[in-house]
Amino acid sequence: MAETNINLAAGARSWRWQTAVLIGLVLLLAALPLLANMLGMPSLISLATRIVILAIAASSLNLALGYAGLISFGHAAWYGIGAYVVGILYRHFVSGEALLGLPIGSDQLLITLPAAMLITGLCSGLIGALALRTSGVQFIMITLAFAQMIFFFFVALKAYGGDDGLIIRRRNELPFVDLRENENFYWLSLLIAVVWILLLSRIVQSRFGAVLTGIRQSEPRMAALGIATYPYKLVAFILSGMGCGLAGALMANHARFVSPDMMHWTQSGEFMIMVILGGAGTLLGPAAGAAMLILLEMQLGAVTEHWQIILGPLLVLMILFWRGGLSGLWRQMMGTRHD
Amino acid sequence: MILLIEQILNGLQLGVTLFLLASGLTLIFGIMGVINLAHGSLYMVGAYAMAFVAMKTGSFALAFPAGVIAAGVVGIGVEYLVVRHLYARDHLDQVLATFGLILFFNQAIILVFGRQPVFVQIPESLSGSVQLLPGLKYSLYRLVMIGVGLASAVGLYWLITKTRLGMLIRAGASNRDMVRALGVKIGGLFTLVFGVGAMLAGLAGVMAGPILSVQVGMGEQVLILTFVVVVIGGVGSVRGAFLGALTVGMVDTMLRAFLPGMLREMMTGPSADAMSAGLSAMGVYVLMAIVLLVRPHGSAGAHG
Amino acid sequence: MTEIVLDVRDLTKSYGGLKASDHLSFQLTRGDIHAVIGPNGAGKTTFIGQVMGDVRPDHGSITFAGQSLNGLSTPQRVRLGLARTFQIPRLLKEQSVEDNIALAVQARQGHSFLFWSAVAQDRSLLDPASEIMRRSALSARAKVPVALLSHGEHKQLELALALALRPQLLLLDEPMAGMGPSESRAMVQILLGLKGQVSMLLVEHDMDAVFALADRISVLVYGRIIASGTPQEIRANAEVRAAYLGEEG
């Protein structure tokens, strides 16, 4: 009993530590544009924006992959659809043409982001409802195949650029904030990322999250407890798809360009790598994994244009020998037990 | 009518190519429990090795076996170095490690052969066409492809149902411990099966080489189509892979052949062509969705 | 007035040529501990699987508390008041004992589409969970990850999870398997303490435990019940002795 209390106290202490470190980290990230400008490296801001947006996508995939154990190899589809919602709405805003008879073009971020999440939610709900009829290796293959189907759909969609994609001439507007300033767009993306990750952290600690964790560890056990797992898996799949849609919508604004390449199957693979690199089933691991993968690709890219010939084997070695990812390392440093 | 028969033959030809890939993929999964994304890379290796030897020697008699053997050797190397360590891991680790292999193989090919597609002529002795019916001439090479593919299917069926190795494969798919108890070195069996799967993939790549352009990324396109085949046919079932491959080959070919004409009748303008190209590419995935709705666990029984 | 809580009629299930259940009929009286014994491969686990809905029978009917179970999924059956333990423990190994039991309590309380409040501070889950841990002698291990528990503790937790569902009928698949003598005795005591509160179908190889616990015993051989009766009747039955008890000693 005494031992348990000591463990609990140590747990609480390290929890306070971690909270302090995290708040410090967010403040540091918020100060990054100022530092970048001081150092005369404004391109850092754009890089950081990319990382923050991909962190949203990776954290969202983590809900399905890391917590519920749903190995989706198709999340780039949701990322791409979110981006296309922004692109298509902007296109109609500029041209004034109706879409399916409705006058719904928009360049307002407060409309386009929720619209992107809504549409990706619907699409991932539809595909998820089908794909979740299977499990295991079939689920991996099916999510990959359906994402490829969506990829082909947008390649064929000549009305919106087909292969070439869509250019968004100006970022979406937000009242009182000029998003054309890169600093402002970075801060907005950071704010959205922090809010989204906090939201995910509530979800995984809730009753719903407890069910997801259970599903990953033993589906027969969940059935024996009287829990029909399908609806929970579907909701997790939809939520995680919506998060990727949100990330895609932000990326469309950041890059001011969308194309089917965003939903290429290798992008799905990269999202998975981010999650594993950082640590599946941990709160901040995937965000750290996103940063690590982007920086790694940049560093390797500076060495050789054939950097994938290094990244590939590196990935193999990491899977074979380095379990737990960055967050495993973090836990060792903070001296907390695995839970 | 002539056009239809021609397209049926084309569908058959795509079908046997997919079968060569799907049977290896599904055997490897059924027996070792490993999902191998790099299976498409072995297809690519086969095609490039064939193209390389054909360019250097001008001899297809050398180039074709070389491609198959190269894929087999690379496959066994991959099994020994990487895949062997993934048998006890979960599917996620297998997917990511073999994804890493794809990145490696694609870049390695780019380093050696460049990004430009390599074109290989159809061997002269097979370059003609055959008068199948009055008014129907069909490429001899494609006919040979279909023949080789079907012969491979028969050979595989014989191997699995009639030989001791096949007995072990079937037993291993349902119960690994039992095979171990029979005193078989399971590691050796696994390597052998992986090698056979790799050679089948290589054979598919070798045969497709002269009618497609040999290029980086060819493996992944066909891999994803192979996944559709395996999902439709049922994971682990070679018979299912055969039926699934022929179905996907037919459906894909028919849509590509006849959808543009149908769409052009319904709508005008250049967008019809682009749209039909996209829609016919989506067709097999819609087929997969329908199969999932009707039979979530695939259309054929396991281990046929 | 005795009530039949579980009524199985003519249950048939075959795998290829092997008959796991062969026109199996079985009645369990409410409040009883009814043991099912038989040699390995007699179809005991398949029988439990069919009652729980994991295995679909080829033929036959299963009625629980007057309601037909045919066509219902496992979760639906659990909601009606069935619960089981697994012969090979199926637990959430990364979670603590308390997490596992709290999840079972949560499952009993209804749907889990609640996204905001943290489970770890939810008294409506933790209080019942700690009560169950106390009764199952697991309180001292509350915060320990399940992966670190002993085999005997896994078996205890299996039972605790089933009890957390407050079932009317408990299906116990070899609860003593792999346990040492003292652990077995402790499990017998726990089950005796539950006697009368919950009906039990007990599949077990430990004959001491079976004869200590059971009100009735049915003997299952090759998918068929060859004898059914009180422990005294079964002990006296020559056919049973020949088929099963004699070999086991």
Image: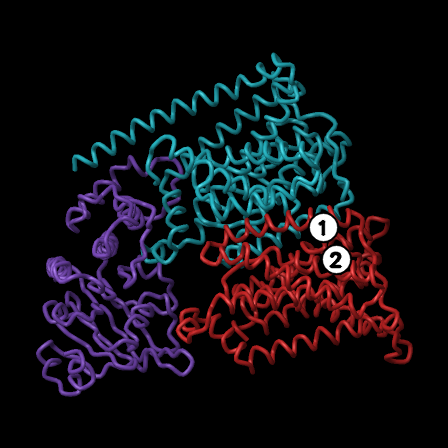
Chain colours: A cyan, B red, C purple
Along the viewing direction, whichever of A332 and B54 lies nearer the viewer = B54
Q: Residues within 10 Å of mark 2 (few under 14, many from 20)?
A: many
Mark 2 → mark 1, Cα distance in angstroms: 8 Å
Q: Nearer the viewer, residue B158 or B276?
A: B158
Q: Quadrant of the C terminus of chain A?
A: top left
Residue ID at (32%, 39%) = C119
In the picture of the structure, the residue carrying the numbered disc 2 is B48
Q: Secondary structure at mark 2?
A: helix
How far across and down, in percent of the image, does residue B222 sit? 69, 58
Asked whether residue A188 is in view, the answer is yes
Residue at 27% across / 61% down in the picture? C84
* Residue lying at 11% horizontally and 70% vertically, measured from the top left: C208
Crowding near pointer 1: few (<14 within 10 Å), some, many (20+)? Answer: some
Check chain identity for marks 2 and 1: say if they share one: yes
Where is residue C16, by image quadrant?
Answer: bottom left
Q: Is residue C131 above or below residue A116?
A: below
Amino acid under disc 1: Ile
**Residue at image mark 1:** B109
Circle count = 2
Q: Position of residue A40 (x, y in %)?
A: 65, 14
The answer to whether the residues at label 2 and label 1 have Cβ atoms under 8 Å apart is: yes
Circle 2 chain: B
Identify the mark nearer the N-term, 2 or 1: 2
Chain of the residue on which disc 1 is drawn: B
Q: Nearer the viewer, residue A75 or A338?
A: A338
Q: Is residue A301 left or right of residue C79?
A: right
A187 on left or right of B106: left
Give the structural element (helix, strand or loop) at label 1. helix
